[in-house]
Amino acid sequence: MNLTHNNSEGIKREEGQKQLLERNLEAHRSRKWIINFICAISLFVAILCFCFHVPRSVIITVTVTLLFICTIIKTVHKTLDKKIELRLKRVKQEQRKSIFKVNKP
């Protein structure tokens, strides 16, 4: 009976961890608008540079720098998204394994 009790506690803990990871993944994906906003601001800054007749070298430098920053931010966001997804898959697999262990006599 103690073994079954320990397994049920483990299942509850894994279920809580799964729900936490699902919420983290959802929250992480909902922050994607921030990245799009940063990219839009970057484009706006580049357009303002053209409007105020800033020298071409400055426009090119600013545009390339902002594009580089946007690319890095998007890459990091995708990497974190994949990392959370993989952790969630791993928790789900462990949960399935523990359910099969409980069902075996």
Image: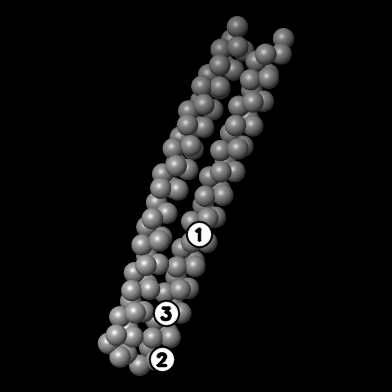
Q: Which residue sits at x=42%, y=79%? A: 63
The answer to whether residue 103 is left or right of residue 51 is right
52 up-or-down from 80: above or below: below
Residue 104, position as x, y percentages in the image? 71, 13
**Which three-letter amino acid code belongs to the residue tagged 2?**
Ser
Q: CA distance from mark 1 to mark 2?
A: 29 Å
Q: CA distance from mark 2 to mark 3?
A: 10 Å
User: Tag 1, which secondary structure?
Assistant: helix
Q: Which residue sits at x=56%, y=12%? A: 5
Residue at image mark 1: 76
Disc number lying in front (1 or 2): 2
Q: CA distance from mark 3 to mark 1?
A: 20 Å
Label count reads: 3
Tell me where residue 4 sits by quadrant: top right
**Which three-letter amino acid code belongs to the residue tagged 1?**
Val
Checking the image for residue 57, the label placed there is 2
Residue 66, position as x, y percentages in the image? 42, 74
